[in-house]
Each structure stands twice: as structure tokens, then as C-alpha cells.
Image: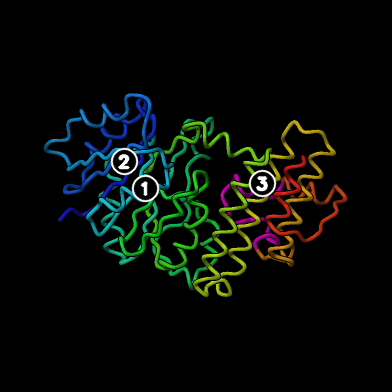
Amino acid sequence: MVKVSVLIPVFNAERYINRLLYSLKKQTLKNFEVILVDDCSTDDSWEMINSFDTEGYFEMKCIRQKKNGGVASARIRAFEESTAEYVTFVDSDDYLDKNYLEELYNTIVATKSNICVARIAYHPSLFPLLAIKNNKRLGFYDLAKNKKILPLMQCGTWGKIYRRKFVLLPDKKLRVNEDLSINHFLFAKARYVSFTNSTFYHYLPNKSGLTIKHSMGINYDNIKNTVIPLEMLKKHFIENDMLSLYYLEVEALFLRFIFQRITELILSFYNRNKKKKLIELLLSYLSFEFKDWENNPYYLRGFRDFELPERFYYFVTYIYLKTHRLIIRKISANEMLSLYKNY
């Protein structure tokens, strides 16, 4: 039986897919399978993955969706077709160090953890050292005893290896920020997590345009695609009777991602009045979900343990809060999104 299943959703990836497949050919781990699910690409991605020669390196299965369903749908299909006890997700325009699979597999087996996290290198970057993630948290953690780790972790499915029985995948209807809706709950449920600094997952942030289009936080769709996944994330904790255990950490996650949107609004080209109204709406929603968020210990510590981008979002938002008079009410997600449409 294969040791690891590598699951790759593919959509219009003709510029990058060969680089990823060659990085898989170079892997030092032997006996793994690769499942590629093409989500109705309109370029030559399907032809390229079918013609790629993997003989003598790894088993590869190529599947084409009958209709475009989005990355969550493609990942679900790939997972259903996989067979290994350990699975890892890779985006089609990223690539891996040659020891990536072996290092993650050996670490998760040796530590008996349920998830193992690699270091992340973001490309391109003007400051490569600042682009390297997860380089401080090494070793093995029981998240029930080290809850402060939970809100610090990046929410992407990629860059990790999972024990199969602990894999939970997001609602296939979500087409943007789908990982945000599930992954931090998955970490908490899996409980035992390890980190390695011996290998890199190489991530390209300006991928398909979806990442950029839905990351700037300055229109209705972008805000909705942050709020809806956050709502779903909180619901997972509630339905599994875990919110009381991780209340402050879930609250910190809401702060983290809402502060990111607020920072993007502050830095946008909107006029001052419009920025203020939109920021008030976001804070009113935050106050509805977590009425005492200003006393959250992660907030009071200035996001000190978070990665550099999150500390920047905190700093910009904190300065704005201290220098502007804001009218903050308590409104639900639906109310906030309804009002947001008017701006």
C-alpha cells in the first residue's frame, strides 16, 4: 500500500503544472501516489498532466470533473479517489522541496501526531527571509494543552500532511476562502500537531487571480467571502461542543481575519467617510459575535506571537481605533452584509 496520497486540484495551470510534477519526480520518499483532478480547465492542463511520464517514480491518476465545481469540489473528489493512510494537498501552481514528502511522513509517524506542518516559503518576495513561515514553532504539540498555537497557524490546506481519519473537507459550495471555514477546527479536533523546519512548501501567492480578487476586502463579495467562512468555522466548534474550550482562540481568529480586511480598507482608495462606515460595520459584526473582544488576551498582547503580516494588521487597526471615533453596534452577519451592499 502506498505511504502518502498527494492530492492536487488543477484549473488552468498549464504554466506551472510541469514544475510541480517534476518536483514530485525528485522526491526522496518512495511509494506514494498522486491524484490530479482537473476542474474543467480551458487551457492545455488536461493534456499536459495526461502526457507527463511518471513511470518508475510514482503512481498517478488523472480525473476530469464533468463540470467546474471549484477547488473544494476538486479536493473532495481527489480525497475520495486516494488510498493512503496519510494525505497531503498541493496547489497546482506551487512546488515542493525534494525531501518534502519524506520529511513530513517520517515526522508524523515518529511523533504519532495527526497533522504535521512544513515551513512555507512565499514566492516571489522582495524579502525572502520574511516570507518564510512556521520557522519558530518546532516539535510536537498537544493543542488542548497549548491552545495559543491554534490561532497562529495559517489556514491553508496545503503545506501539511494529515492522518487520513482526521481529514475534514469544506463545503464544496464554497469557492473562495474554503480552508478558512474548516482548518482551524480540524487542527483542534486532531489535537496532536507536529512542526518540522527541515523542508519547504513553496507557495505562489498571486496564483489564479482568485486569491487577489478576494483578498483586498474592499467590496461586498470580498467581505462576504471572509464572513461566511468565519461563520461556518464557529459553527463547527459549537456543533462539536468545543467552543468553550477554544473560545479565546476562535475569537482571536475572528480578530485576525477581520483586522486584515479593516487594514485593507484603510489602505484602499475609498474616501475617508466610506472607509469609516465600512469599518464600523465590520466592528459591529465582530461585537455581535464576541461582545468582549477588546479584552481578548491575544489582542491585549498586540498579536505578539503572530506572524509579521498579522502583527501589521493589528498595528494598523489599533492605531485607527485609537484615532477615530467610531459608532459600533451589534449586528449579525446577515445584517452587516445587507448594509454593506449599500456602500
**Who's the residue at 41% across and 56% down the image?**
169
Badge 2 is on which residue?
37
Q: Which mark is residue 25?
A: none
Residue 171 lies in magenta, yes or no? no
Cα–Cα gap, marks 1 and 2: 8 Å
Q: Position of residue 206 (x, y in %)?
A: 50, 32
Badge 1 is on which residue?
75
With respect to residue 289, does 87 lie above or below? above
The span shown in magenta is 298-315
Circle 1 packing at 10 Å, graded few (<14), some (14-19), many (20+), is many
Magenta-colored segment: predominant secondary structure: helix
Tag nearer the camera, 1 or 3: 1
**Who's the residue at 66% across and 45% down the image?**
261
Which secondary structure, mark 1? helix
Q: Position of residue 199 (x, y in %)?
A: 34, 46
Residue 307 lies in magenta, yes or no? yes
Which secondary structure, mark 2? strand
Q: Closest to the observer: 245 or 312?
A: 245
Q: Amino acid at mark 2?
A: Val
Which secondary structure, mark 3? helix
With respect to residue 331, does 259 lie above or below? above
Q: Left of 337 or right of it: where is 122?
A: left
Tag nearer the camera, 2 or 3: 2
Badge 3 is on which residue?
313
Q: Amino acid at mark 3?
A: Tyr
